[in-house]
Image (cartoon, rainbow, N blue to C red):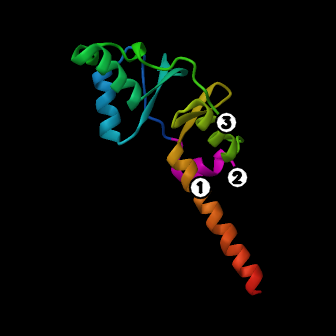
């Protein structure tokens, strides 16, 4: 099973912001959309960073309320680890575990085509295990 199966279920809409967007505005976007990370695009096209709720909390803890007026670029992760549609769910789970993050952008040909969360990955792993268990029961019963 690969990432294309997750994107087929959840869609390819990705909430993005520019690197100059204020941290406070990005925080509101995360809350309003009930998401845990936002992809940062340079010029509205090229992925130049990703920001999670954790990044924002750390910045506010370090700088106080004044951090909310700073550009999101001050706390974004600039070295973005990504996957593509053909990446397996197991590969992506391994990447997320090794790097200790919960969101990974899906990029192909330099274009952002989706984002996958650890929740998406776990959901598909559970569905896969349930299908395999049902297949085994059917095989044994048949």
- Classify residue 33 as left or right of residue 135: left
Q: Is residue 49 above or below residue 82?
A: above
Look at the numbered disc 1 and give the secondary structure of its residue: helix
Between 37 and 44, the one lying in front of the other is: 37
- Which dot marks residue 14? none
Q: Residue 137, position in %: x, y?
A: 70, 79
For disc 3, the marked residue is 84
Name which quarter of the figure residue 17 lies in: top left
For the point 57% across and 48% down, which residue is it?
121
- Which dot marks residue 124? 1
Main SS category, magenta section: helix
Check if mark 2's residue and mark 1's residue have beta carbons within 8 Å.
yes
For disc 2, the marked residue is 1
Q: Residue 20, position in %: x, y?
A: 38, 14
Q: Residue 69, position in %: x, y?
A: 26, 15
The tag earlier along the polypeptide, 2 or 1, is 2
The tag earlier along the polypeptide, 1 or 3, is 3
Mark 3 surroundings within 10 Å by alpha-carbon count, few (fewer than 14), some (14 through 19), many (20 or more): many
For the point 70% across and 52% down, which residue is it?
1
Q: Is residue 42 magenta?
A: no
| Residue 61 visible somewhere in the drawing | yes
Q: Is residue 71 above or below residue 86?
A: above
| Residue 22 visible somewhere in the drawing | no
Q: Residue 86, position in %: x, y?
A: 72, 42
Mark 2 surroundings within 10 Å by alpha-carbon count, few (fewer than 14), some (14 through 19), many (20 or more): few
For the residues labelled 2 and 1, the Cα–Cα distance comes to: 9 Å
Q: Is residue 9 magenta?
A: yes
Q: Residue furthest bottom?
A: 142
Name which quarter of the figure residue 138 lies in: bottom right
For the residues labelled 1 and 3, the Cα–Cα distance comes to: 17 Å
What residue range appears in magenta? 2-12
Mark 1 surroundings within 10 Å by alpha-carbon count, few (fewer than 14), some (14 through 19), many (20 or more): some
């Amino acid at each position: 099973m690969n990432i294309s199966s997750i994107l087929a279920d959840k869609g390819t809409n990705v909430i993005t912001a520019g690197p100059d967007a204020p941290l406070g505005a990005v925080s509101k976007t995360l809350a309003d959309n009930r998401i845990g990370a936002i992809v940062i695009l340079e010029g509205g096209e090229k992925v130049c960073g990703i920001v999670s709720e954790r990044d924002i909390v750390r910045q506010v803890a370090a700088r106080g309320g004044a951090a909310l007026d700073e550009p999101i670029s001050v706390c974004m992760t600039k070295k973005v680890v990504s996957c593509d549609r053909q990446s397996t769910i197991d590969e992506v789970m391994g990447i997320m575990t090794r790097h200790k993050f919960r969101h990974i952008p899906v990029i192909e040909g330099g274009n952002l085509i989706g984002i996958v969360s650890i929740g998406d990955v776990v959901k598909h792993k559970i569905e896969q295990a349930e299908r395999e268990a049902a297949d085994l029961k059917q095989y044994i019963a048949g």
